[in-house]
Amino acid sequence: MLLRKRWFCVVAAIIFFQFYSYGQYPNYLCETALPFCGDPIILPSATVGFPAQPGPSYPCFIGVINGVHWFYFKALSSGPVVIKLEHTPLPPCPYVIIPNIVYGHFGSMGDLCPDSLDNDHVLVCNLSGIVSPPGAMININVISGKYYYLMYFSSECGAPPQSYLITMSQTNRGQPGAGVLDCDLVYNQPCIITFIYADTTPCNTSTNTFNINGLVGFMYPPSSGSLVVKDVNSGLMDIISPPFAGQSNFSIKNIPCDGQIHTIEAWFTDGECSLDTTIVAPQGECTIGVMSGGGHICREGVTFVCLQVLRQRCISRRMAVCLPIVSAGRLTMYPNLGYQAITVPGPM
C-alpha cells in the first residue's frame, strides 16, 4: 500500500543583538540626591522625563530642563575640586553637552531642599565648556566641613532618543593641595546597579551555543563578595570578584541557541541591589527537540510538525532539514547522545 508521507522540519536563523537595561533614577530630585566623594560614578542618561523641579535657582539655564541627576558631597579639607562629566559616545551622538550647576557652601545638610538652593548659593552654573568629549569640567573651591549640591543634565541622542553613559569623577583627587571629599557618606549607602549592557554573539553551529558579553554599571558597590551575572534560562553565569569601580565586564559562555527570550540578572552577593534585562537568543542552524503540532508548509502540498529546541547539539548543519515520517509511533533520534524520544503522527 502506498503511503502519503508527513514531514517534520527544522528551520534556523542567526540573530545578533545588543541590549541595554537601565535601573531606576533615584536622584532626579535634590531631596533624593546621592552622595559623591570623587570616585567614578557611571549613570545612563535619561531619554525622556525627569524634569528639573521647581524651587532651586537655575540662573544660566533656559527652557525646559529634563533628565536631571542630583548629587551632594562634603569637603573634608579646603582646596580646589575639579569634577569631570564625560559620556561614552554612540554613533548618533559622538558629542553631547552636559550643563551643570553647583550650590554651596552649606554648614549642614539640614532641610535645604529645595528652597535654600537659591541664587545666593550658586557657586558655578556652566553653559560653556560643557561638550563631551573632552568633557564638561566643573571647578570649585571647597571649604572644609561644608556641604554642596551638584545637578547636571545632558542633551538628547538621536531620534527617537537613545540613552548613553555619563561618568562623573574628581580628576584632581589625591593631588597636592586638592580639596578632599568625605567618603564616609557613601560607606553605608545601599548599592545601586545602574545598567546592564548585553551583547550576544552569533550561534556557533558546531556546538549550537552562543555567548553573552557585556557590562554592568553600579554605584556604591560592596567591598566584599562577588558580582554575579546570570542567564536565568540556562542557569549559566559569570562571577566577578572585587575590587569594583563603576562598571565590570562579564561573559556568559556556551548558552544553547534556542531563539527564546532570556532573562539576564545581575546582583551583588554582599549587597541588596539587583537589576535584570532580557535578550533574544539566536536560533541555531539545526535543533533537536520535542515534537509539537505544526500545520506549517514544508513544501507545497505537504504538511509537517516542527521541532522545538531541546538540546544543544545539531542533527544537521543545513539551514533546513526535512525528514519523512511514514507511520505513527515513537521516534528516538541519536539516543547515544541522550536525545529524547518524540511522538510523531501517522501518515495522511
Image (tube, rainbow, N blue to C red):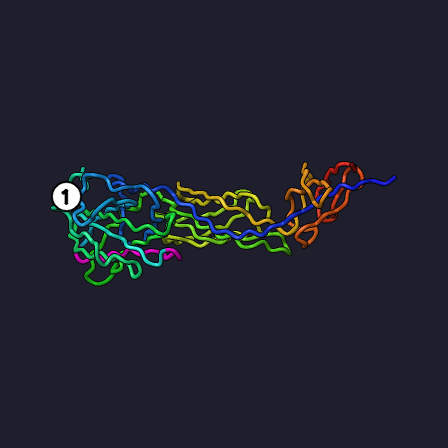
Please provide the residue range marked out in magenta: 78-92
Q: Is residue 339 left or right of residue 53?
A: right
* The residue positioned farthest toward the left in the image shown: 120
* The residue positioned farthest toward the bottom in the image shown: 176
Q: Amino acid at mark 1?
A: Asp
- Image x and y of residue 114, in percent: 19, 39
Whether 90 is among the magenta residues is yes
Which quadrant would the N terminus be assigned to in this image?
top right
Q: Is residue 43 left or right of residue 334?
A: left
Dominant secondary-structure state across the stretch colored magenta: strand
- Image x and y of residue 186, in percent: 29, 46
Between residue 17 and residue 166, name the one nearer to us.
Answer: 17
Q: Residue visible at 71% across and 42% down?
A: 340
Between residue 158 and residue 189, name the one nearer to us.
Answer: 158
* The residue positioned farthest toward the right in the image shown: 1
Q: Is residue 41 left or right of residue 310?
A: left
- Image x and y of residue 15, in percent: 55, 51
Between residue 212 and residue 188, name the one nearer to us.
Answer: 212
- Image x and y of residue 336, in percent: 74, 48
**172 up-or-down from 48: above or below:** below
Would you name the residue on which mark 1 appears?
118
Which quadrant would the C terminus be assigned to in this image?
top right
Whether 80 is among the magenta residues is yes
Q: Is residue 70 left or right of residue 121?
A: right
Image-quadrant location for residue 235: top right
